[in-house]
Image (cartoon, grey):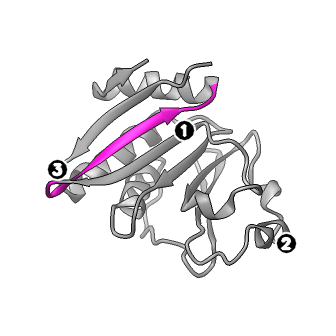
Amino acid sequence: MTPASAVRVAADEAAMVEFGAQLGAVCEPGLVIFLQGDLGMGKTTFSRGFMHSLGHQGAVKSPTYTLVEPYRLRDMDVYHFDLYRLGDPEELEFMGIRDYFGDMSVCLVEWPERGVGALPLADLRINIAAEGRGRRLQYTAQTEQGRRVLAQMQAVSGAQTQA
């Protein structure tokens, strides 16, 4: 299967939150999303919009020290991972990482490259990079579910998709 991709530019923090909300609005249980980008690129800001679109009312902070922050939203479990401080992917096995990825959960994973070998294939991979004063977001679907969600997001937001 050829991955589908879309590119968006977020001019500011509000746009990052909005893009996260647009993805959250079309997400499905079982979805695994990898968020990649350097420090300060807006991965947690994006996650905030995602969580708020699913009904979370409070703050969304990066789980840098706890590795995972659980949320119960819209009749599903949403897990927000931040693997930045992970020393070795094997640590994820000790915390029971496989238990988090299921048919009724959605997993957002920041710094997924630090968990290589312990993480499942992402349905959707989002690379965030600086572009001027804003951010360039490239979404790549890696599974059929990812393609479906990406198509729904495009329909809602008008993101430019590339085959």
Residue toward you, 84 or 59: 84
Residue 121 x, y percent position in the rendering? 69, 42
Label 2 to label 1: alpha-carbon separation: 25 Å
Which residue, given by chain and number where applicable, does mark 1 sit on? 124
Local SS, label 2? helix
| Residue 49 is one of the magenta-drawn residues | no
Whichever of labels 2 and 3 marks the residue nearer the N terminus, that label is: 3
Tell me where the magenta segment starts and ends, as one range: 132-143
Q: Please tell me which residue lies in front, 47 or 159.
A: 159
User: Is residue 96 shown to the viewer in this render?
Assistant: yes
| Residue 81: mark | none
Measure the C-alpha gap from mark 1 to mark 3.
Answer: 22 Å
Of mark 1 and mark 3, the one earlier in the sequence is: 3
At x 44%, y 23%, the residue is: 152
Q: Is 69 rendered above or below residue 103?
A: below
Alpha-carbon distance for marks 2 and 3?
40 Å
Residue that numbered label 3 is attached to = 11
Q: Position of residue 95 (x, y in %)?
A: 80, 71
Q: Are marks 2 and 3 in contact (CB under 8 Å)?
A: no
Q: Are marks 2 and 1 in contact (CB under 8 Å)?
A: no
